Every structure is written in structure tokens, then in C-alpha cells.
Image (spheres, rainbow, N blue to C red):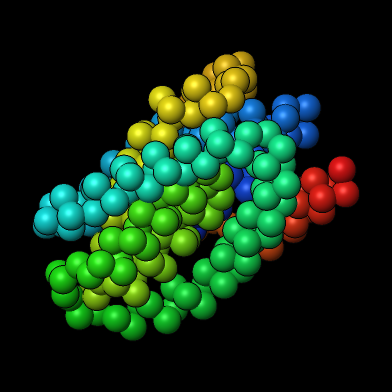
């Protein structure tokens, strides 16, 4: 499960739609499963960013400009978790899963549309900074398909090749999670045995994600993740 989640994160985003439902199915409360999942995904994002390092070359000015919004958004997401608590999270999370599934469903069309934008521009607007903050807040609050959301925000605000934007996207998700994890430890308990199993697996999955994806049908993988996510959302709503 962890390897597959890490691989899905490396290719298209949405790996949490695999690992989060499984953690809930083991009996963990949704908020505990969410925090546990965020902690366990960190090694995977490290390996993903390492793999994208060549495409981060020359993007230092963007990273410096977007770092503060990403950090502020991540802290805001943790704050929302702390203020809302278990009851609010359990009420909201089914709809967040449905929204994440919708993002994952439109990801191929979104990617195809954005690939047509090959020109480069370095201007960073206020709406872009606010969008990155909002995306980082979502990433730290729940995180499923956060990479798809952030990629869309970056592609609307920055004109560049999609691979370079995706590298920047993965780096910002990593930063958001790195900022959020220490604070999340104060919000809800972490199931450390699950982290011990998942974390190494996501590390491996992130490192070999692209290679695995070339052997799998993107459509089949995406449909499977969406069906799983919607099933969990319906189960949480009914429960």
C-alpha cells in the first residue's frame, strides 16, 4: 500500500486516497489516520523532490517568493485542524475526499491543457501567492490530491513547462508537510507502528514511481484510486 501510494504521489498526486482509507479501515479515528498518514508520507516526498531536482534548477527566485506563503498556509491548515477537532474533521473529510477524487478525475485533461503553455514568465502575482497559501493549507489539513490542486494554481499563475512547474509543486508540498508535521503532533495522536510500516514504503514508492507508472495503465490506476476514495467517502458519510 505504501509503495503504491508513494508511486501515485510521484506520478499524478492522490496517493493519500490509497493510504488514508486503509488506515481508517484498520480502526484508526479519521483525524488520527490523517495525521499518521501525513507523517508517513514525508520520506516519499523527499525521494520525489530528489528525483525532480534537475527541473528545480534555476527556480530559486520562485522558491524564495513562494516559501513564505507555503509556510503560512501550512500553519493555517494545522490551526484549522486544531480548532475544529475530531468532530469537524469527520464531518468535512468525506467532502474533501470527494473533491480530491474530482481533481484526480480531471487531472489528465488539466495536464493536457497546461502542456500547451511553453513560454516562460517569472512574474508572481498576489493571487498566485494567495493561491499557494491556500493550497498549502489544504495540504496540511488533509492533503489528498494537494499536488494536483497546487499544480493547477501554479500553472495558472506561472507560464513555464509543465515538468518544471510539477517539480516546484512537489517541492512546495514537501515544505508544507515538513512545516505541518511538528505542529500536527500536538493536534492528534500518531499511530507510530503504522508510520514504521508506511514511511519506508512511501520512500521506495516515491523513488520508483515513474518507473512503475510506465508499466501500469494510467487510466486503470486513476479509476481504481477514485473508486476507492468515493467508497470511503460514502462509508464515512453513512457512518
Q: At which x and y percent is residue 186?
A: 50, 22
Q: At which x and y percent is residue 34?
A: 60, 35
Residue 186 can be seen in this image: yes
Instruction: Judge left or right: residue 48 versus residue 85.
Output: left
Instruction: Judge left or right: residue 42 versus residue 35.
Output: left
Residue at the extreme top of the image, as rendered: 193
Instruction: Judge left or right: residue 108 versus residue 231.
Output: left
Toward which corner of the image does residue 162 lie, by quadrant?
bottom left
Residue 163 can be seen in this image: no
Is 191 placed above or below 74 here? above
Q: At which x and y percent is residue 49?
A: 31, 44
Q: At which x and y percent is residue 66?
A: 24, 54
- Which residue lies at the image location 63% right of the left edge and 66% below the top edge? 102
Residue at the extreme right of the image, as rendered: 238
Instruction: Judge left or right: residue 61 versus residue 68.
Output: left
State the residue in front, 61 or 128. 128
Q: Quadrant of the C terminus?
A: top right
Is 37 placed above or below 225 here? above
State the residue in front, 168 or 189. 189
Amino acid at each position: 500500500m505504501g509503495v503504491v501510494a508513494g508511486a501515485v504521489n510521484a506520478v499524478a498526486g492522490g496517493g493519500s486516497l490509497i493510504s488514508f482509507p486503509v488506515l481508517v479501515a484498520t480502526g484508526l479515528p479519521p483525524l488520527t489516520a490523517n495525521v499518521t498518514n501525513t507523517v508517513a508520507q514525508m520520506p516519499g516526498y523527499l525521494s520525489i523532490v530528489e528525483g525532480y531536482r534537475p527541473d528545480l534548477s534555476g527556480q530559486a527566485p520562485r522558491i524564495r517568493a513562494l516559501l513564505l506563503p507555503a509556510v503560512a498556509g501550512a500553519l493555517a491548515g494545522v490551526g484549522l485542524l486544531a480548532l475544529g477537532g475530531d468532530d469537524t474533521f469527520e464531518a468535512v473529510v468525506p467532502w474533501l475526499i470527494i473533491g480530491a477524487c474530482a481533481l484526480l478525475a480531471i487531472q489528465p485533461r488539466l495536464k493536457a491543457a497546461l502542456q500547451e503553455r511553453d513560454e516562460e514568465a517569472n512574474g508572481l502575482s498576489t493571487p498566485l501567492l494567495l493561491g499557494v497559501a491556500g493550497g498549502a493549507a489544504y495540504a496540511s489539513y488533509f492533503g489528498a490530491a494537494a499536488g494536483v490542486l497546487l499544480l493547477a494554481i501554479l500553472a495558472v499563475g506561472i507560464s513555464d513547462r509543465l515538468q518544471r512547474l510539477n517539480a516546484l509543486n512537489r517541492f512546495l508540498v514537501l515544505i508544507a508537510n515538513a512545516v505541518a508535521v511538528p505542529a500536527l503532533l500536538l493536534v492528534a495522536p500518531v499511530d507510530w507502528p503504522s508510520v514504521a510500516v508506511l514511511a519506508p514504503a512511501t520512500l521506495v514508492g516515491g523513488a520508483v514511481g515513474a518507473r512503475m507508472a510506465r508499466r501500469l495503465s494510467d487510466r486503470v490506476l486513476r479509476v481504481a484510486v477514485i473508486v476507492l476514495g468515493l467508497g470511503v467517502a460514502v462509508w464515512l458519510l453513512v457512518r
